[in-house]
Image (cartoon, grey):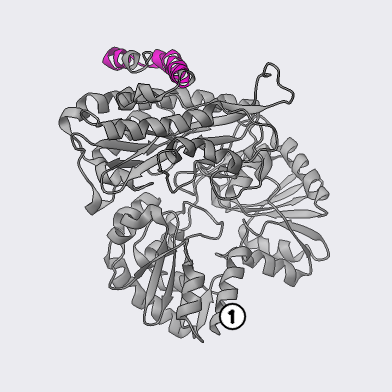
Amino acid sequence: MRQSFEEAADRSFASRHLPRLRAELDKQGLDGLIVPHEDEHQNEYLPEANERLAWVSGFTGSAGAAVVMKDRAAIFTDGRYTVQVRDQVDPAFFEYLDLVEGGPPAFIEGQAKGAVIGYDPRLHSPTALAHLTRAAQKAGATLKAVEANPIDLAWATDRPAQPQAPVVPHPDDLSGESSESKRHRIGRMIADAGADAAVLTAPSSLAWLFNVRGGDVIRTPLPLGQAIVDKDGHARLFLDPAKVTDGLATWLGNEVALQVPSALPAALQALKGQAVLIDPAQSSAWYFDELERAGAQVVRGADPCILPRSAKNEVEIEGSRQAHIRDGAALSNFLHWVATTAQDDLPTEDEVVTVLEGFREATGTLKDLSFDTIAGAGPNGALPHYRPVRRTIRRVEEGSLLLVDGGGQYLDGTTDVTRTMAIGTPTDEQKNRFTRVLKGHIALSVVRFPPGTTGTQLDVLARLPLWMAGLDYDHGTGHGVGSYLGVHEGPQRIAKAANTQPLLPGMILSNEPGYYKEGHWGIRIENLQVVTAAAPIEGGERPMLGFETLTMAPIDRRLIEVGLLSDAERAWMDAYHAEVLAKVGPLMDGEARAWLETACAPL
């Protein structure tokens, strides 16, 4: 598990592991090595055995990269991990650089003149590799594909085994569509793309297409493997036999052949002369190299499972509703604890995390968290996506704010919710900023928009109340969420950055505007919501789409400056709280239930 690796990681990793890695670089005649965070499946969260970046540096964040040279090394992270990377990585061995502004390509272009830089083609997508290749050409450097990853060789003696979690059926009454139906639908899409077959390497696509779930990746119920799907809907699924549970072959049916991973290279070679669809953003360069060597016609295109997976069916949407009600009860019990016990005890951030996770576990239906819980007290809350790590842990303080972002994986849905809470009496400034964030959140909840609208076109709605006060936030407003799959799922997104994917009915997205006062406190309000067909608008001339809110948990009334809200915004707030009380209230009792009634009272 990634969590156990993280607990073991410390600043000594670089001093202990860099010499071992550099010895392997010398053996292979390399001047350096590119170390991405991603593994062979381009996962966001990794099994312990694939935490190569963490092994060499000690950094355990979910996004990053490093370049290790003979005499220096650099680690690249984005703004989410500014604190964490400094806590975990020794600056005596690694220079801290920005992943977004330049990243490894800029480092190679400026710092690797004439060098021979190794890379593992199994870990880089063709798109990412193209950027690195251009940078190397500008530097007069050479990129060299390695047969054996130098990190794997250096790590060989104490590297954990690859995960072998059981792969189990995900029943049709939870998935809403049989695997056979999905495979034939995907087969038609493959044919429409002008291909004879498709190679799938994204674990989420395997889980969705074959209606299975696994446990190879922490925080996401994914099985690691690959598949080749023919245009007639027949498929070969490559899984470690140790993962194959009794009855899985029967569940998959006669049109799916289970094969061992070692058979994959030969299966790719057998595609000679065929047109093969493969996604350059999802699959590593190794697959493209193998298909080209086999003499297949490579058809570059999106993984055909991505869009159907993102547009949830009615069974999945109803499952998400029910998961959010149970999760909302757990979260409401936690919010009651914050509003009472925590106000006097002033717990530490890690204690806050333990309490929230305990309430989720108490539901009896939690399979895993959907990501590591974020709890930011005071100044730490001003770091978007901060998470308590060792020396950074703070105690909740009177007069400040507590920002908590967490979620759960349930068989019927995946949750992700953020609440910001006042500790003691909030200041006028805190209430003003919170209410502006709330106004943006409400705007994105009630908007109606015509089919064909993208998340990019809606993003401004969430920011406008902040912009009008000269304020903003530096992260996206919404990401896609899976159905008992990844908490981050594309292609849907709401952000300033251009995104050409229209929002479709059934897509689940987060709605999470925020505001962060550096060095003081942070605010974020996050609900999940699903795209639906909107009710006809009186006098309207076109059909419209809208959002249905899924998350059910109260928003801290003490932080709302009611005078800043319009009548319509107040009506939305009261209606939302009434719905929370009606749906979550029956799952709570005692003092917590009484508190919920007060927390959800009309403004």
Whether 316 is drawn above or below 199: the answer is above
Q: Does the magenta stretch include residue 572?
A: yes
Q: Is residue 146 visible?
A: no
Instruction: Name the residue carrying label 1.
Output: 137
Q: Which residue is drawn at 82% across and 46% down?
A: 232
- Provide residue 188's location: percent of width, then percent of height: 81, 44
Whether 594 is drawn above or below 556: the answer is above
Whether 316 is drawn above or below 135: the answer is above
Q: Label 1 sits on what residue type?
A: Gln
Q: Can residue 238 be seen in this view?
A: yes
Q: Quadrant location of the C terminus?
A: top left
Horizontally, residue 224 falls left or right of residue 391, namely right
Q: In the depicted view, which residue is nearer to us: 310 or 544?
A: 544
- Provide residue 503's location: percent of width, then percent of height: 64, 37
Indicate the quadrant where residue 327 lies: top left
Q: Give the range drawn in magenta.
A: 569-595
Q: Residue at x 53, y 32 (%)?
A: 444
Horizontally, residue 59 falls left or right of residue 460, namely left
SS assignment at label 1: helix
- Provide residue 343's location: percent of width, then percent of height: 20, 28
Horizontally, residue 529 falls left or right of residue 582, namely right
